Amino acid sequence: MKALVVYESMFGNTADVARSVADGLAGAFEVTVADVRDRPSPAGVDLLVVGAPTHAFGLSRPATRADAAQQGEVREGAQELGIRELLDGSARLAGTPVAAFDTKVNKAYVPGSAARKALRLLRGLGGRAVLPAESFRVTGMTGPLVAGELDRARQWGQTLAASALAARQHV
């Protein structure tokens, strides 16, 4: 079985979470981790996972990526394309199991979630949500991740794998 983890990451934090989620999935899936800039196709995958930083209460847009780039050194090409644009141009998912995660600032009552928005878009394309959207915390806009979040991401990946396999048996 194949899983695709696609991430958008300005400062590297969401990319780190994506790799940890992939590590958690690896026991049950052959996992490919891809940067959104590579425009990976979900064709032929048994599980699609997307991850993005929360910008302005949801998924990034070109303007919010430009604003973020002014906060610090960003990964090369990080402003070019986001999960929102990738999903807006994506083909129908026809029942493919899907999941989404985000990174967001570790403050009380921070509204909005890129993961919840991404999961709505994935469902709109015909994807079947396996788990609710998940958030992983960063200490500030540019990071780093809060201590323990990479372990939590790996555990979430394991839970996701088990849930995806269980859902597959009930289809």
Image (tube, helix red, strand yellow):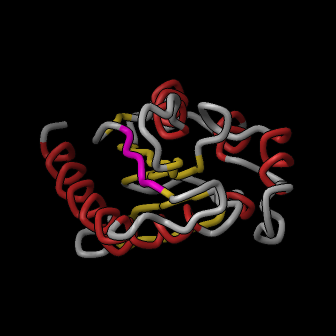
Q: Is the residue 136 above or below the residue 171 in the image?
A: below
Residue at position x 49%, y 34% from top?
110
Report the side of 32 relative to 38 (left or right).
left
Q: Give residue 97's quadrant in the image.
A: top left
Please give the name of the residue rendered at 19% of the width and 49% of the height, measured from the top-left corner: 163
Q: Quarter holding the N terminus? A: bottom left
In the figure, 34 relative to 61: above or below? below
Provide residue 25's location: percent of width, then percent of height: 31, 67
Q: Above or below — where is 146 with respect to 98?
A: below
Q: Residue at x 24, y 64 (%)?
A: 155
Q: Which residues are magenta?
A: 133-137
Q: Quadrant of the C terminus?
A: top left
Question: Residue at left 59%, top 56%?
Answer: 140
Residue 3, how many percent across, how many down?
Answer: 40, 62
Residue situated furthest front in the rendering: 108
Identify which residue, 12 or 138, lies in the foreground: 138
Q: Is residue 35 left or right of residue 155?
A: right
Residue 83 among magenta residues: no
* Whole-percent x, y for residue 89 in the image: 72, 37
Q: Could you tell me what secondary structure mostly forms the magenta stretch?
A: strand
- Disc count in the image? 0
